[in-house]
Amino acid sequence: MSILASEWLKVRSIRSTYLIIGLSLSAVLLGLGLAAMAAGMYDSAPPDKRPNARIAELEEVLVIVPQLCMGILGTLAMTSEYVTGLIRTSLTVVPRRWPILTAKATIIGFLGLIVGPAAVFGTYFVSRWILGDRFSGAYTTEFLDRLPILAASSLTVPVFALLGLGLGALLRSTAGAIATIAGLVYVIPIIIGNLPEPWSERLGSLMIGALPRQITGDGNASSVFGSLLPPAAAGACLAAYAALPVLAAIWLVRRRDV
Amino acid sequence: MLDAVIELHQLTKHYGGTLAVDDLSFKVEPGHVTGFLGPNGAGKSTTMRLILGLDAPTSGQALVNGRRYATLSRPMHEVGALLDAGAVHGGRSAYNHLLCLARTNDISATRVAEALEQVGLSGVARKRVGGFSLGMKQRLGIAAALLGDPGVLMFDEPVNGLDPDGVRWIRDLMRSLAAEGRTILLSSHLMSEMALTAERIVIIGRGKLIAESTVAELTARYPSLEDAYMALTADSVQYGAAR
Amino acid sequence: MKAVFSSEWLKLRSVTSTYHTIGTAALMVALGAAWTFYVSGLADERGSLRAAAPEEGFLPLVQISLAVLGVLAITNEYATGMIRTSLITVPKRGTLLLAKAGIVGLTTFVAANAILLVTYSASRLIASDRHLGFNGTSFADDLPKLLASALSVTALALVGLGLGAAICSTAGAIVSVVALLFVLPGVVNYLPPPWNTRVATLLLPNLVPQIADERLSTRLGDGFLPPWAALAVLIAYPIVTLTIGYFLLRRRDA
């Protein structure tokens, strides 16, 4: 508990934390802008074309902003200590080492759990408010019908935060950890999209971006992602993205010279 | 004779092919300052890291109060250490930096304020550490070591970057801490300072023990502590330079 | 100036991160070969097929790896405090940045071309006369695309360097590069037409096909830019970011 308080203070006492959380929430503003633009297009379109107008689910597109930002928050929580050498002091005052990592994971995961839903639900409600009943689809269906996918998308944000934390501890390099996250989220899906079947769909089902819609059972019909996993397996897969790097980090940090 | 508080038993550490600490055994006793001397690269910092459980020894062991450091549950109450004054996050205030450390060992915020007062940093407690001079960072590092009011203290080159006032302050602080019965291990390259501060001396070179003695014995055999150091480390310095 | 260049060259050669980033980029060769073996096997079963060319499919890997090299060329110095020493020895900050840009540009251009050419040749050799969809054209026809791809890598590395100089933070600069390379193109797809195509034509990853005079994608259609204009936009990216980086570097206390 005392170590948790210490890690909480570490996160609170750095300006970049607030900057990163602010950037995460800028997804809501981006959603506002995109929705306003779409509403303008809709209103200026001839009435006979309006029923066919479609709009993407903005919060599912823009969730990449809090994902990436909170991934970096997680990375920096670890790598900033390695860069400055503070990690030596931290591990001197807590020589068992693992409580430091679990405390960091708890704090970072908790922040992700707050920021993720704030960004995703914020974007959803702002878009819905701007668009009104203009487009048929995501923003005119009942909120309760959208709730599962909104919750599942939100959950990817703490997963990214923990993934960043784990990679930061494993690689001890800000550049390495962030580039690995970018590779995992952006480069690999591009490559997988180019794979011939059945591998494209198989591997595409395992990508983080593919998991929310498999958790809710909606499937990823119009994207490079696959839809092979049942909801429970997709949920387990999402949890594994967070848990495996953090567990590997705890294992390694306990054994490695600082 | 008092029981030794820091004990090294045949401590050895390899980094890849480099032998940093070589079969090193010595004891540090309470009640006085023990100076830890050796040329650059002799293994002083590595030895301190091994004592603190930051690096794992290849063989042998280091004990603090009869136990391995890593098994201590509230280590700040037993051991305080300053290894690298620059190892702080520049964006954090001095007060928050210390409070982060204090919280892990259930040390109160009042104690943090006391420690800041003790090292003379109360006036800049809320300032970002990034703007501190090296001397101020040394004082901050010493405050961190003192937080838990520990019986054992280790300082790696704490005099670096301090002004003459600060050097005298450290000397008086070390001696008063030792007079309270604490165990102090202090590394430094300033021989004149060491002669004034320390009572016992441990000298290592290329990871091996060269001498373990009192300042009085050394200054009896040689004109000064500096001469003693030069004579004793001559071999290891030359060998080190030839490598 | 020559001395500053040779010093920067030595700096780049003497840090392990340079080899890590180039090594990661060079994974393209192995991945490209594995890819070609795999689709060749499929082609032997199914006859001909349309697979993506490895030097295009794996290009983002090279782009992001060498962009990190560009970022680290300057943010490493900020992280270690080396920047102060550098600015004492080379007080003209423009000269320092220019030397870094020259070395980063040259290194990444040579590395990218080498990696792309080896991947290209290896995959064509492995494919031999099978019909894989990407190996029907001659080398002369493919050359503009290859050069444009390598140039995009260099441009991105220099953008990384400029951003690194502007914000002095490894995390901030890499994220900005990731945003430019991956996030922005993703979000732009969702702009209402015709804005999606208009903005997308100007984005860095989409300039490569436009320089080679190819379609952007089935979704975005043809690009708006003729090859020379796309090339100009590609070159403008590093020039703009390096200029911003220069002005901030010049005004800021190190």
Image (spheres, rainbow, N blue to C red):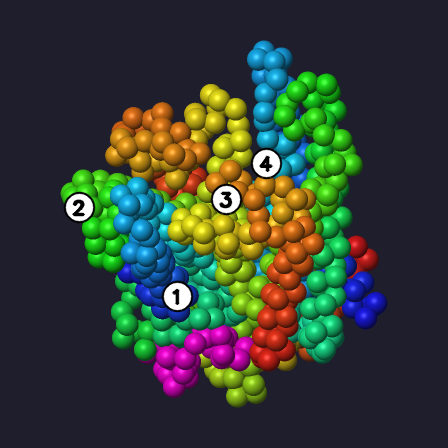
User: How far apart in space, not on screen, are marks 2 and 1 (Cα)?
Assistant: 31 Å
> Magenta segment, which residues?
B114-143
Q: Position of residue B230 (x, y in %)?
A: 73, 70
Q: Nearer the viewer, mark 2 or mark 3?
A: 3
Picture disc at residue A19 = 1
Which residue corresponds to mark 3?
C220
**Label 4's element?**
helix
Instruction: Name the amino acid, label 1.
Output: Leu
Number of numbered discs on residues: 4
The answer to whether B139 appears left or right of C123 in the picture is left
On whether residue B139 falls in the magenta region, the answer is yes
The residue that mark 2 highlights is: A143
> Is residue B77 or residue B54 the one in the foreground?
B54
Check whether the beta carbons of the residues at disc 2 and disc 1 lie within 8 A of each other: no
Residue situated in front as seen by the camera: A124 or A157: A124
**Crowding at label 4, few (<14), some or many (≥20) Cα neighbours within 10 Å?**
many
| Mark 1 surroundings: few (<14), some (14-19) or many (≥20) residues within 10 A | few
- Kindly give the residue lying farthest to the bottom in the view shown: B165
Mark 3–mark 4 distance (CA, rounded to whole Å): 18 Å
Q: Between marks 2 and 3, how big is the CA–CA gap?
A: 32 Å
Q: Nearer the viewer, mark 3 or mark 4?
A: 3
Residue type at mark 4 is Gly
Mark 3 and mark 4 residues within 8 Å of each other at the beta carbon: no
Horizontal relation, residue C208 to residue B130: left or right? right
Quarter of the image for the N terminus of chain B: give it. bottom left
Q: Is residue A47 above or below residue B145?
A: above
- Residue type at the position of mark 2: Phe
Instruction: State if disc 3 and disc 1 touch (CB < 8 Å).
Output: no
* Residue at the image point whose x is 38% and y is 34% from the top: A222
Q: Chain of mark 1?
A: A
Which residue is under mark 4? Answer: C57
Q: Name the chain under label 2.
A: A
